[in-house]
Image (cartoon, grey):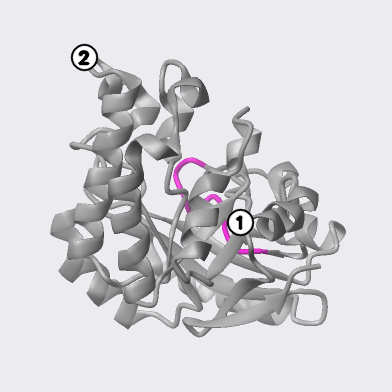
Amino acid sequence: MNADFHMHTNFSSDSEAAPEEMIEEAIRRGLHTICITDHQDLDHPQYKSGEMFQLDFSQYVPTIQKLQKQYEDQIEILLGVEFGLQPHLGAVCHEMAASYPFDFIIGSVHLMDGMDPYDGEYFRGRTDEEGYRRAFEITMENLRRVQDFDVLGHIDYVVRYGSQKEFTYHCSDYGDILDEILKFLIANGKGMELNTAGWKYGLPFAHPHPDILKRYRELGGEIITIGSDAHKPEHLAYDFYRVSDVLKACGFKNYTEFHQRKPVFQQLP
């Protein structure tokens, strides 16, 4: 796999890597295409004077466009963004998506009942199973209210932070709500990503779990992008050598890249 469609730079408040660092490492690793997808996570509880997860598009967009030209003979650089989905942000996301020439938009659910499970508060007073189900219910609520994205990011992100992580996570326990999510994505021309950060965080699977990938394919889903979710150069294309076998085992023959918000199917190596 030589196209990474999920990464962050110091335009995101949780990364210290300059865009040039990420680009040059991508070239060193032999990637032919990258899409920089910095965070726009409005109304995140970690906001401090508007500094947390608020993307400065007036600087971000022209910087990426300048780098596209600077490195055009070495690598294809695409302009992306990762929207943090919340039900009340539908109109805002629509306006942002229409205002800039994005190649690709990830829609990700980082907040559940106003809390990011990364911080631990979300699971206080909840079992893992209750926390996982609630996260999927919130995801479905977001899908009904926010339409301006191309793929749903790391669907089972919440599992990283459960007390027992994968040991209390069985996709069959959530088959009803997961089917609702997958059918909605397919019916509305949306895809999902295979996010290899699951492996980086010590899970035995990339996001989402292979059972979800298989079910998505069984239901007719085809749009699947590949992203490392790297916040540091050394995490670019993380464990990409494993991706093709995982997708083939789940019934896929192709993966997807995006250009000007349109899916382009590529044969799996």
Is there any visible trace of residue 136 in the rendered image? yes
Mark 2 residue element:
loop
State left or right for residue 261 relative to residue 50.
right
Residue at x-position 60% and y-position 42%? 197
Q: Which residues are magenta?
A: 4-14
* Foreground of the two, 42 or 223: 223
Percent x, y of residue 128: 34, 22
Q: Quadrant of residue 247?
A: bottom right
Looking at the image, tell me whether mark 2 or mark 1 is earlier in sequence order.
2
State left or right for residue 82 relative to residue 222.
left
* Foreground of the two, 216 or 9: 216
- In the displayed structure, 119 sits above or below 155; it is above
Q: Quadrant of residue 98?
A: bottom left
Residue type beneath disc 2:
Gly
Main SS category, magenta section: loop
Is there any visible trace of residue 47 in the rendered image? no
Q: How many marks?
A: 2
Percent x, y of residue 149: 36, 69
Percent x, y of residue 153: 45, 55
Image quadrant where one finds the C terminus = bottom right
Q: Which residue is mark 2?
A: 125
* Alpha-carbon span between mark 2 and mark 1: 33 Å
State left or right for residue 181 relative to residue 1.
left
- In the displayed structure, 171 sits above or below 130; it is below
Residue at x-position 33% and y-position 75%? 187
- In the displayed structure, 249 sits above or below 174; it is below
Q: Which residue is mark 1?
A: 227
| Label number found at residue 83 | none
